[in-house]
Image (cartoon, grey):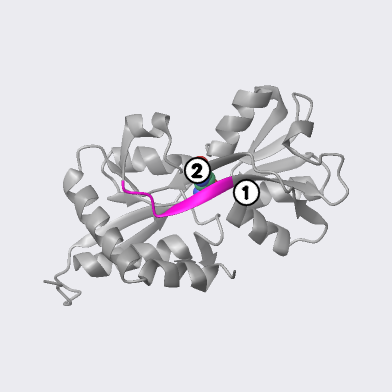
Amino acid sequence: DTNTDTDTQETLTMVTNAEFPPYEYKEGDKVVGIDADVAQAIADKLGMKLEIVDTKFDAIIPGVQSGKYDMGMAGMTVTPEREQSVAFSDSYATGIQSIIVKQGSDIKSVDDLSEKTKIGVQLGTTGDIYAKDDFGDEAVQEFDKGADAVQALLAGKIDCVIIDNEPAKSFVASNEGLEILNTSYAEEEYAICFKKDNTELQTKVNGALKELIADGTLQEIVNKYIKA
Ligand code: GLN
């Protein structure tokens, strides 16, 4: 039974990094986006009151691990390394690592990247990890926000930005002179993370996700933020 009396409802704390449009970003002081809406829909299904906390991307997993937050949701890719630290829900979205360059750049595809390319990434993301693995630490410049990496690209300080496809589209749409290469760098699955032993919440959230997929709510939320 869903408890609709908000005063007595238990709180579900979701931690995110609101620098990743259209999954999470700020509208005034409010965190909005696909993850915010999906988290709200999950909380509604569980009869809980949602609280969203905004922090740095690399503080999400430690905060969930320590039990400070109930779950982390940040367009977060499931990786074997992260699975050592946290438990993941079923996947609710897919992402593709994309490459943003200035229009007319010599970089035309992933094959043009090398140890000499100045690659901008968001700190602690899979783009960061893969780029360092493939091209070495020297090639990679880490930024707290994807938007800052994009500004560095516009200023000519770096040659490209490796970031997930939907934020890439959003950054290219809001800045002139950039393009996304027609080449994909890696494909991944997004999921919600929990403290490892919190199988109770993991199971409940997976149940809620199944319902949200079956009743079309998830697709509705995606359509609200991503225009085909
Ligand atoms: N999907 C990427 C990752 O999990 C980026 C997520 C993000 O920047 N919010 O590392």
**Is residue 110 toward the left or the right of residue 129 in the image?**
right
Q: Is mark 1 within 8 Å of ligand 1?
A: yes
Give the residues in magenta. Answer: 89-96
**Residue 98 image offset from top left, x and y in percent:** 65, 46
Q: Residue at x 61, y 52 (%)?
A: 165
Q: Which residue lies under the disc numbered 2?
A: 188
Under mark 2, the amino acid is Glu
Comparing 123 with 135, the one in front is 135
Label placed on residue 160: none
* Cα separation between marks 2 and 1: 18 Å
Q: Which residue lies under the disc numbered 1?
A: 146
**Residue 154 image offset from top left, x and y in percent:** 80, 50
Q: Residue at x 79, y 39 (%)?
A: 159
User: Does any portion of residue 28 appear in the rendered image?
Assistant: no
Name the secondary structure under disc 1: helix
Name the secondary structure under disc 2: strand
**Is residue 225 toward the left or the right of residue 102 in the image?**
left
The residue furthest front is 214
Under mark 1, the amino acid is Gly
Comparing 97 with 14, the one in front is 97
Q: Is mark 2 within 8 Å of ligand 1?
A: yes
**Residue 47 image offset from top left, x and y in percent:** 19, 68
